[in-house]
Image (tube, rainbow, N blue to C red):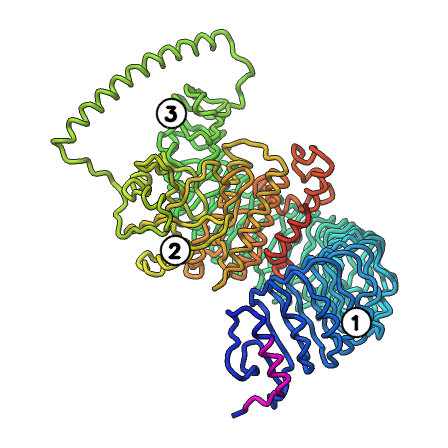
Amino acid sequence: MVFSRLSQTQNEAMNNLSNNLPARLPWTGSDPCAWKGVSCDPAHSSVVGISLSAFSLNSSDFLPLVCKIETLEYLDVSQNRLSSIPDGFITECGKIKGLKRLNFSDNLLEGVLPTFLGFDALESLDMSFNAMRGTIGLQIDGLVSLKILNLTFNEFTGSLPTKLGKSMVLEHLLLSNNSFDGKIPDELLSYENLTWIDLKNNRLSQSIPTNIGKLSKLETLILSTNNLNGEIPTSLVNAAKLSRFAANQNNFTGSIPSGITTYLTSLDLSYNTLSGPIPVDFLSPPQLQVVDLTNNMLNGSLPTKVSPNLFRLRFGSNQLSGNISSKAFEEVHNLTYLELDNNILMGSIPAELSFCKSLTLLNLAQNRLSGELPQELGNLTNIHVLQLQLNNFSGAIPTQIGQLRKLITLNLSRNSLSGSIPSEITNLSGLNFLYLQGNNLSGSIPTSIRLLDNLLDLQLGENHLRGVIPSMPLSLQVTLNLSSNLFNGSIPYSFGGLTSLEILDLSNNGFSGRIPDDLTNMPALTRLILSNNPLSGEIPKFNHHVNVEYSGTNLKNNTPQENPIANRGSKNGISVAVAILIAIVAAIFLVGFVTLLVLSLSRHYYRVNDEHSQPTEVRQHPQVMQSNLLTLNGIHRSNIDFSKAMEAVAETSNVTLKTRFSTYYKAVMPSGSIYYVKKLNWFDKIFQVGSHDKFVKELEVLAKLNNSNVMTPLAYVLSTDTAYILYDFISNGSLFDVLHGSMDLTLDWASRYSIAVGVAQGLSFLHGFASSPILLLDLSSKSIMLKSLKEPLVGDIEHYKVIDPSKSTGNFSAVAGSVGYIPPEYAYTMTVTMAGNVYSFGVVLLELLTGKPAVTEGTELVKWVLRNSTNQDYILDFNVSRTSQAVRNQMLAILEIARVCVGTSPESRPKMKSVLRMLLNAR
């Protein structure tokens, strides 16, 4: 048994420190060496380390007391809420001879970087993820032992610092995600011990120093997302220890230096203006694992010699030509991502590509590839995404496609494929997106297509399909496109059961007869396209937000004032005959209204009298098993009537909003107060309603949350097959409604900025929740409600607590998120994360900045923004950005924040607390 042998001085210093820290800290007992976060030497004779990370500290007053521990070697106060570093700390701790590591990361530090005097032994200084600003001159030049400097995610400006320790022993220089500008100074090359340089996401310009290769110990060089130009220095070819080089999203020109991959394991030069052919030996070095040259101007043929350890290869959006070599990929068994899309490649897909058993994503879209699809594609059993659209493939779809049981996206659109849709395609139980439009497919749709119960988007338009349309998967959410085929007869009534579907396109077919009334019961429907069909009769009354397109039909719309239906073939103006017709209809309407009023009063009279003698009619309401109030607010407790809430959910006309997992109903209580009753829509019984106790306990915790930007539950009802949660009614609806939907408003920039900050505040609060982070399964503009046009509420917070995506029998990405908001890594990591929420928030930011929905012009908004990144004014919503130069500048600043949030790598995304800080500082 080892007893504490701390000196009286150290015991007093530790107890004094403990007394000046919040009482909630678990520092109890007589032995400081046993306190949480305190480290002592093996003999327990001196304190060598103190870690107060994530202790929710918001006052820095205790810091000078730490300096009384003269044996201290490291101090970690990261992940707190400290806003300043007292001068006394710098003065006193600078005298500690053995202090080697200081970690102030992930706080709220403001102001300029302190000047560190003393600290002769300090080897590591981490001030990342704060709000520090100003320029850096000599503040750290006195740190003679400094090896690691991390200042990432701050707001430093001016030139890159060059005084980084007089002894010049620096090894790691991490300055990313700041606002440094100017050139990369040659003075940095004097620090010959540098092994890691990270300068990404700054405003650096000009060219890379030509002799940067003289840093013989350099292992990692990251220069991404700057304004650097010129050519890639050939001296990097000689950097024998350089394993990772990333310089994507700059303005580099010229050719790729021959031999640059000789020592590299990872190279990213995507989104530049590099030209010329790819060197012959570019992919051959055996240690090479990751290469990304996407979106350049490279030409010539693909290299034929490929590293057997290659993991990711991205050559998309260039001008590469020639064939895909049949020998290039025979031995590349680790290849997981292969993207050669948007080039000029010709020939067929080599069957040998099937040797890449680890392929998860194969994208050969938008080339000039031809021939039949090889049956061997069926051997890629690990593939999640297969994109072969916009080529010249012919022949039938191979039945072996049905062997790809892990497939999430299958895109064979815009080719010349013929024959029927193989029934084997319905073996792909995890499929989310099926795109077969724009081919020569014939025959009927397989009846087994209903088995694709994770399908979100089905595109079968522009083919030669005919016959009976089978029942469609009820999971369809985005689009069902059957346009430009040979279907005829009546529109199937079964479409009315697609309660999650937003777009139904039946145009350019032979459908006849009337529109089934069942289609008016589709609560999520926003667009119904019926153009160019021999349909007749009156258009039923759809919800006000449904846009019905019916030009080229014999349909009549007799309720334009309540149902604003778009008829793109109509002429502007109203003829005299139409005006007379409107007058007649108005007269008929008036007579009809009086008649209905009399009948209504009569029925009310008889019903009131009959209620005394007849039993009350029983409606088909949900069978309630348990209900309870969660709020202590007396007004809500007196207003909420559970029977009225259940009456509301029995009527589809009360549906006001449908999100990925929920349907919101408007419920009017006897008092006249209005509430949301949210029905939770479960996917394949992920949440077993039998576990009522867990559900109720989670709701009770959420009901106690106190944040002005988070929707908290007021009450709940459990039925035999689902659950209902009551909330305050929000008359302004969702952010989606305001930006893209029924409200049709143009939000000014002040409102959009306020919404962005409010959502960030709500998410920061949820991610920093005391017991454990509260994550969102589906953060989208539909799950953000608006108390006012400047006050957002983050909704659907309970899903993560009661839905376990890992227990889903379907595909994870069908559970976690809405299309356009899902982080790319979710398809492979199968884990909901804070970084994933940050990505989704980045998409919401882009919606606010562009005014466009998460899927725009047939592609995800993130990809659309990246594709148009060279024209920032085109990206911004012109109706907003044109109001003033100050508004435009602020929008551009927040565009940079959004880009960081939607970064491909989860590790590169900031935490929500840092995002919030960046938004506030962009004001």
| Element class at badge 2 | helix
Label 1 crowd bin: few (<14), some (14–19), many (20+), radius 10 Å: some
Q: Amino acid at mark 2?
A: Leu
Label 3 vs 1, first from the N-terminus: 1
Residue 264 visible at all: no
The answer to whether 900 appears left or right of 546 in the picture is right
Q: Nearer the viewer, residue 603 or 788?
A: 788
Q: Which residue is mark 3?
A: 513
Label 2 crowd bin: few (<14), some (14–19), many (20+), radius 10 Å: many
The answer to whether 124 appears left or right of 765 in the picture is right
Give the residue at x 26% y 49%.
624
Residue 341 visible at all: yes
Q: Which residue is mark 2?
A: 699
The answer to whether 605 appears left or right of 78 in the picture is left
Q: Amino acid at mark 3?
A: Gly
| Element class at badge 1 | loop
Q: Nearer the viewer, mark 3 or mark 1?
A: 1
Q: Where, by quadrant of the figure, is residue 516 drawn?
A: top left
**Residue bounds of the magenta highlight:** 3-16
Label 3 crowd bin: few (<14), some (14–19), many (20+), radius 10 Å: some
Residue 360's place in the image compared with 75, above or below, is: above
Label 2 vs 3, first from the N-terminus: 3
Q: Which residue is mark 1?
A: 117
Give the residue at x 50% y 81%.
29
Label 2 to label 1: alpha-carbon separation: 52 Å
Q: Nearer the viewer, residue 738 or 672?
A: 672
Q: Nearer the viewer, residue 672 or 603?
A: 672
